[in-house]
């Protein structure tokens, strides 16, 4: 959600193709940590959830292996938790400095966009709606992952330290957390695999989260409003090094 | 003419008589036709029926040689014609060969081996038992066939059913006493209940295994499930037959099933039935003395979770299906995900399929133009 944007013209590599900075290095690192820790959590969580599967049993071939895989899961959980803390602290810092861009906040425009997109997909409309910096699909992705991590994080720590948590919480939260942790993980995995992977790898190969940049064509096609805004800003003040909003 | 008529009549009389005789034979069963030869029994008891008959063994023990007619009459063997010499096969004449045993126990240990002649299956099984291992280790008092079944008075071992427990009590008196106080034992002692387990139900009959091993522990839930997962049997007593299937999905149960499948010989910490409910002292949950009575549950949990606080027992779903009354948190989480999970799945699938269709159509249209 943080975002300093350097002058797009400075990032251009080729005269014929301008590149726009989409994600800062800081954001790309955050995504990389999220991706890696999440993957480790999924891969070490699955054999624990589906222990009766023969593949899980091959992996968990000795009691020591079970402990090892739990430890890896816990270490990855701590790394992800630290990343979440960093992310939230960063939001607060930007908020205090009044530099937090609001691009990711859901608006009524997103609901209208979603309606128009649905009409387009059902052949009731000729063109895709024009999107801003983050379209409603990307906002859904961010907030879905955000709340999933909140659920999994809280429930995960409860089932990691059940005795400590039940000192002040009712005991019923422990089996409830176990069910929530286990089910939410599958819901999130399904969401990422179908929704996110389709949008960034199949619909188009969008590696901006790793390179940080998108081409002018992509800006025009997928973030037309943002493109118009940037180009309009350039013409009005040609030397803008724009802090966002 | 008359003589010829008379001779003919005589002939038919003989034929009819022979026929009646043959026909009557078919009413007589072979058993009554050949009553058991009890001669040796009578013959032996002519001396061994004397109550004062005894001898002193080299150990100084006095061995009574008296055999009560009453014991013989009630034994399972005598009634089917199995006589003294079937077991005392080293004695075939009088005077008998000299007794070479030093003491009474030595004599018992020598004689029980003749059981194998007829009961070879159970005899072989018992050789694999905890008792046989104890004997191998040098315990002369480890039970042999006759210690449980008796010798001259050998009878059906489960008539009445409580006799089984009484038999074990000869050595394991304290455990049987505890068992009699349990919900199972009390029902057995009250009216010879045929549904409750007796010692042999759980421990086996002839090949009784050591119940203290890790293998026994890890297989123990299945042992209880033998009855407690049977809806018909549990319905009779108003008990839930879901306890085992719910346990198997629990934290404890999953762990135990993995250990059972993969590492049955390795100790595991996850609770099996007996860890919470007790072993020989299992009581009804409503019983104030039950380890799992709500009043005692926390201290039972604390055996493994020592720092657990009073809220902890709420974490236990108590072998019950998820319900609003008993497990409200679990109930709401399940309610939420039972609609949320399929909604996310189908929303993602439908949206992405619509996008794929639209994108393909657009591409084809572009190519056509």
Image (tube, coloured by chain):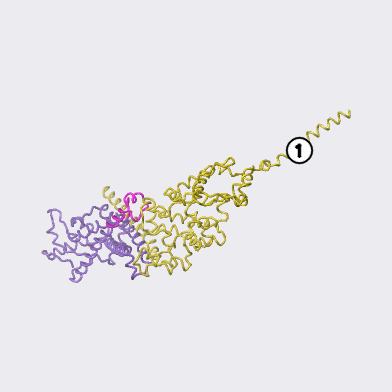
**Left or right: B293, with B67 as reference point:** left
**Left or right: B210, with A72 as reference point:** right
Instruction: Work out whether residue A111 can be spotted.
Output: no
Task: Say whether residue A54 is magenta.
Answer: yes
Q: Position of residue A111 (x, y in %)?
A: 30, 64
Above or below B309: residue A13: above
Q: Colour of chain A?
A: purple
In terms of secondary structure, where does tag 1 sit? helix
**Left or right: B169, with A224 as reference point:** right
Q: Quick one: A113 or B102, which is closer to the camera?
A: B102
Span of residues in magenta: A46-72
Q: Quick one: B59 or B319, which is closer to the camera?
A: B59
Give the chain letter at badge 1.
B
Residue at x 29% of width, y 49% of height: B364
Residue at x 59% of width, y 48% of height: B76
Above or below B59: residue A176: below
Q: Position of residue A44 (x, y in %)?
A: 30, 55
Question: In the orientation shown, which residue stands out farthest toward the left?
Answer: A239
Residue highlighted by disc 1: B20
Considering the whole magenta stretch, tell me its main secondary structure: helix
Q: Position of residue B173 (x, y in %)?
A: 49, 59
Quarter holding the N terminus of chain B? Answer: top right
**Left or right: A161, with B39 as reference point:** left
Instruction: Work out whether residue A155 can be spotted.
Output: yes
Task: Say whether residue A216 is magenta.
Answer: no
Q: Which chain is yellow?
A: B
Pointer 1 local density, CA inside 10 Å: few below 14, some 14–19, many at least 20: few
Q: Quick one: A24 or A159, which is closer to the camera?
A: A159
Quadrant for residue A39, please give it: bottom left
């Amino acid at each position: 959600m943080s975002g300093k944007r350097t002058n797009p013209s400075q990032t251009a590599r080729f005269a014929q193709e301008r590149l726009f900075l989409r994600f800062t290095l800081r954001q790309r690192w955050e995504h990389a940590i999220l991706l890696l820790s999440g993957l480790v959590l999924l891969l070490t969580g699955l054999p624990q959830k589906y222990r009766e599967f023969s593949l899980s049993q091959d992996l968990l071939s000795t009691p020591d292996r079970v402990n090892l895989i739990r430890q890896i899961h816990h270490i990855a959980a701590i790394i992800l938790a630290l990343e979440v803390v960093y992310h939230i602290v960063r939001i607060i810092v930007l908020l205090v400095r009044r530099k937090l861009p609001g691009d990711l906040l859901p608006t009524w425009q997103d609901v209208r966009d979603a309606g128009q997109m649905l009409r387009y997909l059902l052949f009731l409309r000729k063109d895709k709606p024009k999107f801003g910096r983050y379209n409603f699909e990307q906002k859904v992705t961010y907030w879905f992952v955000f709340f999933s991590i909140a659920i999994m994080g809280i429930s995960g720590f409860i089932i990691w330290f059940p005795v400590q948590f039940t000192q002040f919480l009712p005991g019923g939260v422990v089996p409830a957390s176990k069910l929530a942790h286990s089910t939410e993980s599958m819901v999130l995995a399904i969401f990422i695999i179908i929704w996110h992977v389709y949008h960034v790898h199949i619909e188009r190969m969008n590696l901006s989260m790793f390179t940080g940049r998108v081409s002018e064509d992509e800006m025009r096609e997928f973030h037309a409003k943002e493109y118009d805004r940037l180009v309009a800003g350039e013409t009005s003040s040609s030397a803008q090094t724009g802090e966002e909003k | 003419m008359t003589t010829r008529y008379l001779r003919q009549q005589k002939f038919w009389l003989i034929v009819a008589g022979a026929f009646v005789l043959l026909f009557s034979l078919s009413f007589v069963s072979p058993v009554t036709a050949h009553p058991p030869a009890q001669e040796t029994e009578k013959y032996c008891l002519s001396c061994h029926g004397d109550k004062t008959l005894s001898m002193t063994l080299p150990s100084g023990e006095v061995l009574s040689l008296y055999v009560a007619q009453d014991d013989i009459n009630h034994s399972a063997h005598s009634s089917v014609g199995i006589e003294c010499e079937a077991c005392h096969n080293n004695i075939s004449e009088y005077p008998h060969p000299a007794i070479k045993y030093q003491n009474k126990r030595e004599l018992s240990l020598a004689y029980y081996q003749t059981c194998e002649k007829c009961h070879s299956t159970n005899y072989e099984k018992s050789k694999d038992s905890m008792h046989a291992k104890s004997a191998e280790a040098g315990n002369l008092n480890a039970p042999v066939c006759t210690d449980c079944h008796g010798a001259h008075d050998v009878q059906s071992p489960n008539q009445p059913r409580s006799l089984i427990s009484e038999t074990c009590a000869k050595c394991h008196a304290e455990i049987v006493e505890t068992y009699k106080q349990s919900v199972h034992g009390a029902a057995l002692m009250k009216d010879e209940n045929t549904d409750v387990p007796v010692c042999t139900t759980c421990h086996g009959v002839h090949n009784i295994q050591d119940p203290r091993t890790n293998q026994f522990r890890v297989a123990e839930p299945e042992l209880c499930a033998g009855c407690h997962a049977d809806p018909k049997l549990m319905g009779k007593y108003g008990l839930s037959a879901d306890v085992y299937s719910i346990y198997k999905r629990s934290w404890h149960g999953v762990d135990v099933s993995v250990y059972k499948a993969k590492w049955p010989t390795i100790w595991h910490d996850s609770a099996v039935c007996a860890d919470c409910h007790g072993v020989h002292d299992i009581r009804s949950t409503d019983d104030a003395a039950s380890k799992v009575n709500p009043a005692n549950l926390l201290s039972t949990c604390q055996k493994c979770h020592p720092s657990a606080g009073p809220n902890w027992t709420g974490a236990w779903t108590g072998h019950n299906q998820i319900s609003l009354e008993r497990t409200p948190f679990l109930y709401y989480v399940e309610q939420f995900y039972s609609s949320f999970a399929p909604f996310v799945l189908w929303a993602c699938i439908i949206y992405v399929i619509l996008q794929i269709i639209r994108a393909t159509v657009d591409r084809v249209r572009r190519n056509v133009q």
